[in-house]
Amino acid sequence: EVQLLESGGGLVQPGGSLRLSCSASGFIFSDYAMNWVRQAPGKGLEWVSVITDSGGTTHYADSVKGRFTISRDNSKNTLFLQMNSLRAEDTAVYYCAKPPADRLFVGDSWGQGTLVTVSS
Amino acid sequence: QSVLTQPPSVSAAPGQKVTISCSGSSSNTGANYVSWYQQLPGTAPKLLIYDNNKRPSGIPDRFSGSKSGTAATLGITGLQTGDEADYYCGSWDSSLSAGVFGGGTKLTVL
């Protein structure tokens, strides 16, 4: 059974940094691209970033480009999202998602999400 | 303002059929696969349809997907009260090199 478990969320001040992790199990992690998707309170889904299976290619939403960095450690079956220069509008539940085989976008399996709150 | 356009809400009676539309452009829905997600209150999204019309294992055939040009449609037959949820379409945008979602459609089963 595929399991994705996010961690690292919390309260952070504007301008601060946070690093999210997504621990994966139940599938061959290194065979799949991985995505981050977020959802602000009461709002819809917003795609954030994707990384290919090898980690060689990444893409970002314009809203986070230059501030967020996606990475992965295939030896530890873990996906990361480094978030810098955080803004109030980054407040959201952040989900990691595993796409179907040979796909880049977005998720046939999702984690439970981790809440990031950016506030002073 | 979402890149993909969905109606904010739809409603139908139990047992009836409903369709949810998703409109995009030549760089996203017109060029790439469309997927559909169901999100029940307080839970993570769940994949219903991928590659325009494929159902993951465990998704009942009451759920169907189709695409024509830049427009995609999710169909749900035999509506149940448990189908009340938010539904999102998504696709890859080749011009943006980014994933895009619709704004979501709230389904009410009257």
Image (spheres, helix red, strand yellow):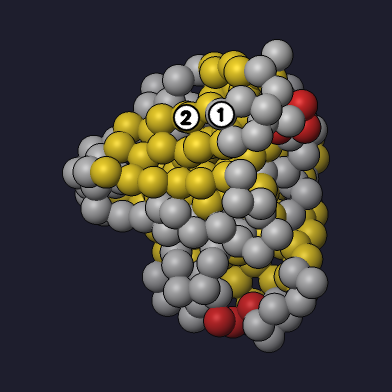
Q: Residue B2 placed where, x, y %?
A: 40, 28
Of residues B86 and A60, the one nearer the viewer is B86
Report the side of B47 relative to B42 (left or right): left
Report the side of B16 relative to B95 (left or right): right
- Three-letter code, disc 2: Ile
Is B39 placed above or below A119 here?
A: below
Of residues A6 and B59, the one nearer the viewer is B59
Q: Residue B80 placed where, x, y %?
A: 73, 30
| Residue at the outermost top position | B110
Q: Secondary structure at mark 1?
A: loop
| Residue at the outermost bottom position | A75
Task: Give the quarter of the image for residue B70.
Answer: top left
Marked residue chain, label 2: B
Q: What's the distance in space between the residues labelled 1 and 2, CA to CA?
A: 10 Å
Residue at point 78% right, 66% down? A3
Which of the two discs, 1 and 2, sits closer to the camera?
Answer: 1
Residue placed under numbered mark 1 in the picture: B17
Mark 2 Cα within 10 Å, few/some/many (few <14, many 20+)? many
In which quadrant will I find the N terminus of chain B? Answer: top left
Q: Secondary structure at mark 2?
A: strand
Q: Residue A84 placed where, x, y %?
A: 57, 46
- Three-letter code, disc 1: Lys
Q: Which mark is residue B47?
A: none
Residue placed under numbered mark 2 in the picture: B20
Of residues A70 and A43, the one nearer the viewer is A43
Task: Give the quarter of the image for residue B29.
Answer: top left
